[in-house]
Structure formats: structure tokens, C-alpha cells
Image (spheres, rainbow, N blue to C red):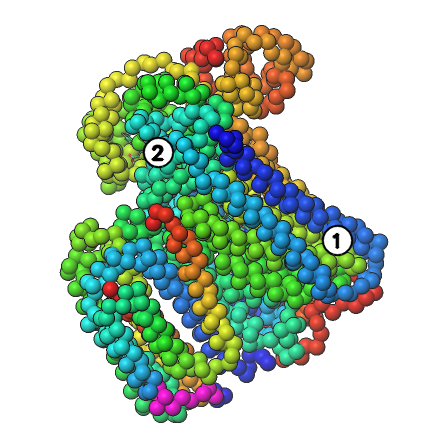
Amino acid sequence: MEESIKAAGSDDRGFLGGERGLRSWIFSTDHKRIALLYLWSIMSFFLVGMTLGFLIRLELIAPGATIMGAQTYNALFTLHGVIMIFLFIIPVVPAVLGNFLLPLHIGAEDVAFPRLNLLSWWFYLIGALMALASLFTGGGPPDTGWTFYVPFSTQTTTNVTVAAWAVFVLGFSSILTGLNFLTTIHRLRATGVTWNRLPLFVWAIYATAWIQLLATPILGLTVALIAIERIFQIGLFDPARGGDPLMYQHLFWIYSHPAVYIMILPGMGIISEIIPTFSRRRIFGYWAIAVSSLAIAFAGSMVWSHHMLASGMSDMGVFVFSLLTFLVAIPSAVKVFNWLATLYKGTIWLAPPMLYALTFLVLFSIGGLTGLVVGSAGTAIHTHDTHFVVGHFHYVMFGGAIFAFFGGLHYWLPKIYGRMYNLRLATWAWGILTVGFNLLYFPMFILGMQGMPRRYYDYLPQYTTLNVVSTVGSWILIAGLLLMLWNLWRGSRSGPPAGMNPWGGRTLEWTIASPPPKENFPGEIVVSTDPYDYHTGEGHS
Amino acid sequence: MSQTHGSYGTAKLGMWLFLFTEIILFGGLFVLYAVYYYFHPQGFASASHELSLGFGTVNTLILLTSSLFVAASLSALQKGERRLTLLLLSGTILVALIFLVNKYFEWSEKFAHGIYPNGPAMPNLAPGEVVFFALYFVTTGLHGIHVLIGGVLLTVIAFGVRRGSIHQGDYVKLENSGLYWHLVDLIWIFIFPLYYLIL
Amino acid sequence: MNPPLLTTAETIDPVFWYILGVCIFFLLLITVVMLYFVWKYHRSRHPYTTSQVSKNVPLEIVWTLVPTLLALSMFWYGWAGYLTLQRVPEGAMVVDVTGRMWSWLFEYGNGKTSDRLYVPAGQPVQVNIHSADVIHSFYIPAFRVKKDAVPGMTTYVWFVADRPGSYDIFCAEYCGTAHSAMITTVEALPPEEFLAWYEGEGPAEADGELKALLTRHGCLGCHSLDGSPGVGPTLQGIFGRQVTVLVDGQERTLTADRDYLRRSILEPQVEMVKGYPPVMPSYRDRIPEAELEEMLDLFERPASAAAPSGEKLAQDKGCIGCHSTDGSRQVGPTFQGVFGRQVTVERNGQPVTIEADEDYLRRAIVEPQAEIVQGYPPSMPPYSELSDEELAALIDYLRGL
Amino acid sequence: MVQQGHIVPYRTFILVWLTLMVLTVVTVAVSRLDLGAWKIWTALGIATVKSALVVFFFMHMKYEPLYYRIYLYLTLVILAIFIGLTFSDVHYRMTP
Ligand code: HEA
Ligand code: HEA
Ligand code: CUA
Ligand SMILES: [Cu+2]
């Protein structure tokens, strides 16, 4: 891929230059090269996951068998979920943008443990390959849903065991990344980068890293127990032997709820960078945003059982977890209001990153607010495990985390590759994507209200119309997505030079060349500016 | 500050963070223990009688002693007493082996009675007893794996000390491996009363 | 009952409206403010920043506190609704339901069983939920109730069907291959009719014996009885058929005799029918020996050429999902009195009024888009796959309503 | 480059070790008494003291910067939340 940047004239290839060849990449300990390794591998799996989503939608275009059988469908949404969650959205922002930017944002030469960083990538790759291997070995692709609920997951004859170990390995990768980032933020800040001068993206990564560190081990344990249960049948969750199937769900969600904040917090960090830059405006409520990231991380570890409101849990459990769920929404609300206030009296440039950031505000709000509907005890009973939930989580994950990530790509790819994509095409792609997105997922809220359960291969005819709309939406979405990816790809290969600071950002990465030199900064630096150092009377140049 | 001065503290912080994840990993098993104990106090008590208090106590004492050796070996290295360091490390590794051998006998005794996952004795047990043994095997098994890893780690470190790559001026590898070993001990300090002592 | 009993739907719906209302309010607020700022401070209108204020503590407090209070109010209202769902009114009729892969079995106080839930309209019903294998979830959207069926636990829901009619029951917790086929209905009957059913033999279990047995054990989730391939091979004419199986990877052809069928059910993974995935669970200890014997007997007996039942078809094909039989308007017009009634339809965009005779009904089923009843959306799918007998049976059934 | 961590005297370690030994014996002895529900709490209490000794002396926590301790407590609080909130379900469950 380094071939892609042909040294054009004076253009310096920075960390992309120097050593060439595959080995110089897959064994590199440079955080920037590792970030790109992640980018390429994660994006490949993203396309696989996307294609599966597309096939799911095709099947649902009409009741009955459309293009596949029930068993295939069940395997498809399982893989779609597993790939999207564990191979894509959990690692994507920390591993790609976090890896690339964290050292730059704090004025460091690399992360604290560069070799461990490389090892994390290898774990990611091995885990991913194991997940793929589960498709072709044993009793066929797993068909449990990404949640692996017992006792079904311990009884099905499909290849759940390998998938479980794959998730275990992926969890390891995530833990090591979190550990690395926490240590980096603590120990490697350049002189002058005090805690109140950290860019909010770094704060977000910091909060995320804590969740990765303290929640992921439970996931490792949980999937290991599934595998052990399948191999030895020890009966830990079997009621006939004194176990309790609901305890599995507790363990699973103890990780998997906090995991949704692993997905969204770094995205929120990106938004906190983009909005000030394109408004030429100091971020409003720096501390409110930083502290709310920590608050989300902490409170997020206390609400897991809102996924179990209809599971036969005790009423007290329902009371406690529903109440805490409403409280965890508050820090998100605080962030949204502070971002809005940042626009006030700024000068707003609707460049593609900003378009994604603003769309994020709306889509994430829709997703978050519908989270309240599924979090309230009375209404949760009706909406649980229906397409309403499917709508909710695609809005927060795709409309939230991934739109933020797309914004981040548009914002930082010119820094990473030193080249600019076509702004007009990017705007078009954004428009198509946004229209397709809403057409695809909004009908799911109505379907859910009407009672269509999720993970349904076949449905009753009264749900047909909205399913057709949704499927058509997915086609439009695809068009936008492919256009966007192609434009970014072409831009990074052969766009015009982007220059050091195309957007006028104030964080440290904009003070060095694009692409950044291998050693990042010329020796040790002393920082005396604030990451949001804008002044009244500024405009876009 | 930048990475050139401070890699000692950096490595140690990294190790501690890793230990936190280990605490949570075993913590998950303790969550299960707490809940199942709550559901089946009788079953747990009667099953716990089946475990040998003697083995458990000896293993506890052994492990605590090994922790002393490791802790002292660090002080020794810091003071430059290399021979003493090596002696203490060998002691620790020896103790780790004794622990594992003990564990082996303990497990095989259970196996001989048909108590193992899906073993012949299991269907006759009360539900609470079955989960007790399930948890017992998973927890002590996972702990055993940690003992093994810790032992191997310390062996590598001991060779490092002998070769001189780990010395008075650069001992963070010993310190970190020691931390890991202490964690293994720490976990056992809780496993012991929970599985052997409650009646 | 006084005061009049609120149904579960009547309890939960206002909660929905309240929470959705607050959500829509905030969404509009955020979107409007955002769009306004973007317009007002767009760089073409506002080329330079005019303020760098970055802190306002009172404002932070306000926009923390107001959402908190609103959130608490939403929580509380939702909790109150939930309590209603959990508190079964006095005098509720108790029915037990067991979920298994992939069917529901209802058991009533007098030992009667059925695979649909028959209840008297207007009387509260408590359903105690059990599972025979994995986790399922008992879900009736019309009543806003749902609860998981967890092995080793008994859970419950209650509801009251205030009008006679047919309401969908879904399995909402993923439970394997035929999860989405684990569907049945609540049949709310007028109290006298219910009593008649409850005490008599009733029309409910008119299905063939074999079919009933297979449904009960969830076989029909994967196997058909009409020759169509499903997850597994069809069971139509299975007895005596030549099958090619793989044993330890070795291909072998044999005749499906009694022994083979027994093995296929108890140890499905040993002899694998070629071309099918190894997903069939073993039914050892899951089917009582007596029932297994009965099942094999029935396989052996050549299938009687039973005429299709129109009512059954209407259920199976999902007609009842959109059409009521009690005169109420649903997605489509009611079936009650449909035969011979005067309808106004749009044909090629022209409204025409015609009498619903046999021919019209046939067209309306096979080619519903050609004539759309006025006032209804053109959402009915065409059922061109129906055989002539099936169509005739359906129309016969409609004639009787 | 010399690493200057705190050097703990052997004497401290030996004292700690002796205490740990004694506590182990005590906990075994106490477990033979009939304390009813208190039994598990005494056992856990003693285990907590023992582990604190290991953490603070053997593992040098006493000599580390304050934030190490804060992070350790954070981890323990999170674990306590995991166990505690699980009981908000389990403790009130009607059919275990
Ligand atoms: C990025 C991922 C992400 C994020 C950020 C969230 C955020 C939230 N989620 Fe979501 N959720 C998922 C991913 C995510 N979720 C997934 C994947 C599932 C399904 C898993 C599965 O079963 O497969 C799920 C399922 C799920 C359920 C279980 C549904 C069910 O199965 O029955 C619940 C229930 O409470 C819930 C609630 C919430 C809440 C309250 C938030 C809150 O954090 C949202 C906070 C945000 C806002 C509230 C919006 C912004 C604020 C304002 C606009 C101001 C106004 C605010 C107030 C008045 C409070 N989610
Ligand atoms: C990051 C998370 C993420 C993302 C981005 C998506 C993206 C999509 N998902 Fe998602 N989805 C999940 C996470 C995600 N999903 C999870 C966790 C579940 C739950 C799983 C479970 O229940 O266990 C789920 C479940 C789920 C369901 C519910 C299944 C069911 O319950 O029955 C549906 C149904 O429509 C769906 C659809 C889609 C679609 C259409 C997309 C679209 O975005 C995809 C758009 C498609 C494309 C853009 C295709 C691009 C194609 C190419 C580039 C190649 C071209 C190839 C061909 C034309 C063949 N998903
Ligand atoms: Cu039963 Cu889904
Ligand atoms: Cu959640």
C-alpha cells in the first residue's frame, strides 16, 4: 500500500516512505504503520459484515424463503453481528485513529509499548482468522446470534466453540490496546501537555481504555465458559445441575453493555475535535465533556441488565437497572448540548467532516432517545427483541459510532496520506448515505412497534411493506457507501497534496508535515498552547 | 516528560494495569460463586467437605512462602546480591512445582472418586454440589494455569539474572514477574477460604 | 369487575406516548437549534467568529438537571406500567404454556391441551411459562406482553382480550433454526363459545393425528408434510423411501424402514441424509416411547388423502394476520360476511362496485393488486402458489363466515 | 540508567510473612468453630487482611504513587458493582 503514494514533486512521504515491502509493515512497531495495518484489516472485515447485512435485507424483502434457507439466515445474522461488533466497531476507532493520533496529540514519539501494540494487531488478525475458520470447520457456521445465549449455544451442533475462542483472542487484543493507551497517556505526555490541555479525543480514548481494561476480562471468561461447557458439559448454567441460565446473561452483558460505550466514546471524541475546527471556535464546556466521558464509562458499568428486562429477572432487578439506565443517558445529553453550544457565534464551514459530525448529532440522538424507550421497564417489555431494538442499535452504532468514524476519516486521512480527496464527491456520498441510512433503519422502529420480532427469517405478511422500504434503503446506502470509500481511496492515492493543515486545526498533529515523519516530532517538544486555541475574529482561510 | 526517562515506571504501570484485568477475570468467577452459593448453601457446604483441608492448607502456606521468596529476591537484586537472588528464585520455582504436584494429587483423588465434569459420581450429587465442583475445577484449573505461567516466567527471569541481563541497575523485569506471581498468590488467598473452609 | 379492568395495552400505550413525546421534543429541539446555528453562523453569512465563550456553569447545571428530572419521570411512569404487567388481577384464568423447539403447547386447568391459546374474551388470563429445552420468549404484541421461557424457571404474563378475535403469539427469543416459525395465536372466543370448547371436544384439534404429533414436537419447524424441502427432508411418504445417507463419510443407500426412522429421530447425527446439514437435535429422552411408537405407526400408515381445511389454510398462509373474522377492521377488510357483500374496488384506477362472488374472491386472492378495495392499502401479497383445491377450500371457508 | 525503586528491608518481608502464616492458621481454626452466617464473613475478612498485606508490602503498593492506589480501589469498586448489582436480581428472584 505504500506504493500508493507516489512521491510527487516536493511531497515528502514521511512514515510511509523509508522501508518498503510487506515485512516492513506487518512487523513494524511504528504506531502510525500499525494504525494503517488496522485500518486495512478492519475495513476488509467491515466490507464482509456489510455484505452480510445486505444479504439479510435481501432475504427480508418478502415473507417466506427469498434467497436462502432458515439455517443460512441464522448463520448470517450471527456472523453479521460477530463481525460488526468484535471485528469492526469495537476496535475501529481506538485501533485506527487512536493509534495514529494518540501519540501525536500528546507530543510523544510512539505509544508506551510499541511491541505490545504490534502484538495486539497480531492477536486481532489471529482472532479474525479463527472467526473465519469457524465457518468452514466443525458443524458449520455458528447460529447463535452474537449473544451466544445458553443453553442454545451449548446444545447447537454448529461450530460455536471455535467462534468462542476467536472472541476470546479478540478480547485479548482489545485489553492490550487499552492497557497500552492508558500507560501512554499517563507517562508519555510532552512537557506542557497537562491534563487540562489534553484534546478531548484523548480524554475519550482514556475513558474507553478503562472500559476495555476492566470489562473485557469478563467477556473472555464468559466465552471461555461457553467453550468449556461445550467440551466438558460441566453444567455451570444448567438448571438441572444447579446452574442458572440467567447468570450467563448477566456475565455476558456485564461486558457487552460497557462495550457499547467502547464503541461510542471514541466516536464522541472525534466529534469533539471536528466541531471546534470547523466552527473556528473554542469547544464549549471542555470539562463538562471530559468528565461526562468518564461518567459514561463509570455509570455504563452499572446498567447491563437492561438487556434482560423481559428475561424473568426479579422485579427489583428491573427497577434498579431501568433506573440506572435513565441516569446513564444524562452525560450523553450533556455532551450533545455542549456540542450545540460550540456552534454558537462560530463561523461554520460545512466541509465533509463537519457534515458527518452534524449528522452524527441527529442520528445519535435518535438512537440514544430510542434507547430510553427500550430502557423504560413498561415499554421495554413490548419492544424487547423486536426490530425496534434493531433500529435502536443501528442508529447508535452506525449513525453514531460509524458516522463519527467516517467523519474522522474525512478529517484525518489528508493528514495520514498527505493527499486530499474530492470534496464535492464526498459531499454527494454523504447525502446519499444519509438518505439511505434513514430509509433503511427508520422503518424498523415502526416494525418493532407493530411487534415484528428480531432474528426472524420469515415474517407475517402484515410486515411486508415496511420491510420492502427498508431493503430499498439498504441499496441506496450501498451506493453512498461505495462512492465514499472509492473517493477516499482515490484521494489517498492520487489526490492533490493536502498540506500540513488543510482544515486549520489546533491540535499538535497539524503542526507537523503530512504524512507525519517517522519520528513524529523533531526531538522532545515543549507545548505551550491549548488544543482549542481559537480567537475572536477568526475565519477560515 | 517523554519516554527516554521513565521506562521503569512505564513498565510497572503497564504491569499493574494488566493485573487489574486478572483481578476482574477471576472476579467473574467469584460473581458466579457468590450467586450459586446464595442459591445452594447446603449443597456448597456438603461439597466443600469433600475437598481435603490438608491439601488446601499446605498449598496456602507453600504459596505464601513462595511470595516471600520472590519479594525478598527483588530486595536482594536491588542490593546487588546476585547469588541470593538466584537462590530465592530457585526456591520460588521449586515451591511452584510442589504446588502443582499437590494440585495434581488432589485432582486425581477427586477423579478416582468419579468427581470430574460428567464423571460417574456427578449424577448422584445434589444440584448445588454439581455446580460447586464445576466452579471448583474451573477456578482452580485457571489458577493452576496461572501458576504454571508464573513459574515459567520466573525461570526465564532467573536465567536473565544469571546471564546478567537483569541486574541491580535494571530489574524491572524481575519486579514485574514478581508482581504477577504475587497476584497468583492473592487469588489463592481467596480461593482457599471460599472452597475449602466454608462448611 | 369494578372499576373496569384496564387492559395491558391500555396501560402501556400511554407510557409509550409520553416517552416518545419527550424524545420527539428533544430531537426537534436539537435538530432545529443545530440547523438554525448552521444557517445563521454559516461562513458565508458569518465569516468571523464573534465569541469564544467556552464556559457557562449555570447553563451546564440547567441542561444537566432538566434532562435528569425528565429522565426520572419517564423512568417512573415506565416502572408503574411494568408493575401493572406484573400484578395479575384476581380471578384470572390460569393456563400453562410450554415452549419447545419450535412450538408452543398450552395446558388448561382441566388437563385439556391445545397448540393455540383459547381464552374467553373479557376475562383476565394468567399464562405460566415453561421451557422444555432452550430459552424462548412468549410474546403477544397486541397485548404488549412478553416474557422469556427459561428452562428451570417458571415465569408468567397476564392479559385480557377485551374483544373476541385472533391475536398473534410469537417466540421472541432466538431459539434455533425455526425460531421464526414458532408462531401461534390467541383465540379469544365469546365466553359461551369458550366454555363449549373448554368442556367439549371443540373444533380446535381437527388436524391430522400425525400432524398434531409432529407439531407438538417441533418437527414441522424443519420438515414439511407436503413434499416441499425444508431444513430437513420432507416427511411426506417417508416410509419405504430410498434414502442416501452418509455414515462416517461413507455413502450408503437404504430403505427407510421402522428401525431407520427410529434411529433418525433418536440419533440423527449418525446416519446423515446426504445434502443436509447436521442440525437436527437428538430426540432421545425428549419423546416418550409411547409417542414415538405412535409416530412410527402413523408414518407407516399411508397418508389418507385428507382434503385441505380452509380454516387451517387461512391460518397457515397468514390471512388471519391481516383479516379479522369478527368484523373488525385490520390491515385488510374483515372476512365476516365477505361472501356476497357489495364491494367498491379500484380497477385500473376506476372505482367499480361489484358483488363478491366466488370468482371475485378467487381473483382477490391470486391477484390482489388488480382490484384494490377502496380505503385499503395495496399491501396484500399475491397467493398464486395455492392449488385449486386449496383455493376452493378457502373460498368455502369464507362462504361460511 | 539506574532504576531507583524503593528497597524494602528483608525484616519487613519476614514479619509480613509470619503474620500471613499466623492468619492462615487462624482462619483454618476459626472455620472449625460454629459461627453460622458469620463464618463466611470472618473467612473473607481474614482473606482481605492477608491480601492487603501482600499488596502493600510484597507488591510494594505502599511505596507507589497515590494514583496506583486509586486505580486499585477503582478496580475493586467495579468488581463490587458487578457482584452487588447482580444480587439486585438474584436476591429477589422468586424461582431460583
Ligand atoms: C454504540 C452503541 C450503543 C450505544 C451508545 C447505546 C446507548 C444506549 N442504549 Fe443501547 N444497545 C446497543 C448499542 C448501543 N446502545 C446494542 C448493540 C444493543 C442490542 C444488543 C443485542 O441485543 O443484540 C442495545 C440494546 C439496548 C437495550 C436493550 C434492548 C432490548 O434488547 O430489549 C437497552 C435498554 O435499556 C438500551 C438502552 C440504551 C441507552 C439508554 C443508551 C444511552 O447511552 C443513550 C444516551 C443518549 C441519549 C439519551 C441521546 C442524547 C441526549 C439527548 C438528545 C438529550 C435528551 C436526553 C434526555 C431527556 C435523557 N440499548
Ligand atoms: C457496526 C455495527 C453494524 C453495522 C454497520 C450494521 C450494518 C447493517 N445491518 Fe446490522 N446488525 C448488527 C450490527 C451492525 N449492522 C448487529 C450487532 C446485529 C445483531 C445480530 C444478532 O441478532 O445477533 C445486526 C442485525 C441486523 C439485522 C437484524 C437481523 C434479524 O434480527 O433478523 C438486520 C436486518 O435488516 C441488519 C441489517 C443491516 C444492514 C442492511 C446494514 C447495512 O449497513 C449494510 C449495508 C450494506 C452494504 C453497504 C453492502 C456493501 C457491499 C459491498 C461493499 C460489496 C457489494 C457486494 C454485493 C452487492 C454482493 N443487521
Ligand atoms: Cu422459540 Cu424462538
Ligand atoms: Cu446496553
Closer to the camera in the image, A194 or A118: A194
- Where residue B42 appears, as percent x and y from the top left, is 25, 57
Q: Amino acid at mark 2?
A: Asp
Closer to the camera in the image, C109 or A229: C109
Q: Amino acid at mark 1?
A: Leu
Q: Is residue B106 above or below residue A161?
A: below
Callout 1: helix, strand or loop?
Answer: loop
Crowding at label 1, few (<14), some or many (≥20) Cα neighbours within 10 Å? some
Check the picture and name the quadrant holding the N terminus of chain B: bottom right
- Does the rendering let one see residue A132? no
Taking C386 as reference, is C355 left or right? right
Report the Cα–Cα distance between label 1 and label 2.
60 Å
Check the picture and name the quadrant holding the C terminus of chain B: bottom left
- Magenta segment: does it hold D12? yes
Taking A53 as reference, is D37 left or right? left
Crowding at label 2, few (<14), some or many (≥20) Cα neighbours within 10 Å? some
Magenta stretch: helix, strand or loop mostly: loop
Q: Within 8 Å of ligand 3, the CB of disc 2?
A: no
Q: Which residue is mark 2?
A: C96
Between circles 1 and 2, the one closer to the viewer is 2
> Toward which corner of the image does residue A143 lie, by quadrant?
top left
Q: Residue furthest front?
A: C2
Q: Which residue is mark 1?
A: A350
What segment carries the magenta color?
A: D4-13
- Where residue C218 appears, as percent x and y from the top left, is 33, 32
Callout 2: helix, strand or loop?
Answer: strand
